[in-house]
Image (spheres, rainbow, N blue to C red):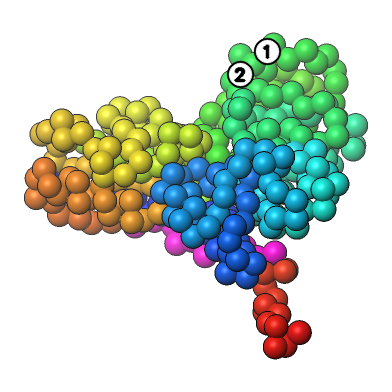
Amino acid sequence: MRVILASPRGFCAGVVRAIEIVERALERYGAPVYVRHEIVHNRHVVEKLRRKGAVFVDHLSDVPAGAQTVFSAHGVARSVVDEATARGLPVLDATCPLVTKVHVQGRRYAKAGRTLVLIGHAGHAEVEGTMGQVDAPVHLVSTPADVALLPIDPATPVAYITQTTLSVDDTRVVIAALEDRFADVIGPSVAEICYATQNRQTAVRDLARVSDVLIVVGAGNSSNSSRLREIGDEMGVPSYLVDDGDGVDPAWIAGAGAVGITAGASAPDELVDSVIAALARVRPVEVSQLDGVVETMSFSLPPELRRPAVTAAAA
Ligand code: SF4
């Protein structure tokens, strides 16, 4: 059985940065370091950091006074930043710079007097953070049907911003619905949605074309991983989302000549290896990788982690 890997797949620059922030914080300040929300949506990543001394909490009220705190890659609402400031908590912000860019866009549009629409999925940590970063009402839509129901006069100047991990195609359709309904609507082009989201979606499309079955490695609560599985399904390829090799059902690959594997932006490559190993336990496999975009993006760390640590001797 051929096993074909998508390229690119797995970790994006925002996830690499977020994990490095927690690891460096643990090295520099010692355990425990308190992380608000899962640093990225992947159980294996979270467990690994937990073993090193990270403590994951849902609310800042669970962080003890003075404890080193990290905000997750998904970003937080302004009220969370304000609460941390009011409590004097030392904070490292692991919000992905591309999510921060959306926050800035949203504030700029609202300041210009436009009614703001966020294209995204209710309940996702990034969406909650983005809605709470803009000091004005934000209308959340995820489908053209939602656009039709917006309680906004069609003559109102509107601007949209987007969650970074959406399906590029679905987003295009929602933007078209906004442009149909409102005379004056502006927003970033779909090409500006996160590079990693776009690259992984393009790669999974290429992969689905040559696969009989598609396996996406990623967490159930990972938005970008779920979108990759949906794209496979939309292309008529049976597609499954698994945490790791333990999630593989041998029945999925019965009779398959080629199994495609990709991974969401928060899934480490070792989990892809565990899926390959699980497949190889069922049938002999021959592994290859498709050609794809070579990613060179990287994001710098917060300044306090870039500076060399001050040792007792130096101080
Ligand atoms: Fe940032 Fe994109 Fe990765 Fe999300 S998927 S963390 S927006 S680089």
Which quadrant, please, contains the C terminus? Answer: bottom right
Callout 1 amino acid: Ala
Q: Which mark is residue 148?
A: 1
Residue located at (27% from left, 37% from top): 247
Residue 46 can be seen, yes or no: yes
Snapshot quadrant of residue 299: bottom right
Is residue 78 positioned above or below 69 on the image?
A: above
Structural crowding at the residue carrying mark 1, measured as other residues with C-alpha within 10 Å and reported as few (<14), some (14–19) or many (≥20): some
Category of crowding for the residue at label 2, using alpha-carbon neighbours closer than 10 angstroms: few (below 14), some (14–19), many (at least 20): some
- Residue sitting at the far bottom: 313
Task: Give the CA separation, mark 1 to mark 2.
Answer: 6 Å
Q: Position of residue 251 (x, y in %)?
A: 15, 30
The residue at the point 10 percent across, 34 percent down is 255
Q: Whole-percent x and y of residue 233? A: 35, 28
Q: Are marks 1 and 2 in contact (CB under 8 Å)?
A: yes
Inspect the image, locate mark 2, and give the three-letter code of the amino acid beneath it: Pro
Q: Residue at x 70, y 30 (%)?
A: 118
- Res 198 visible: no
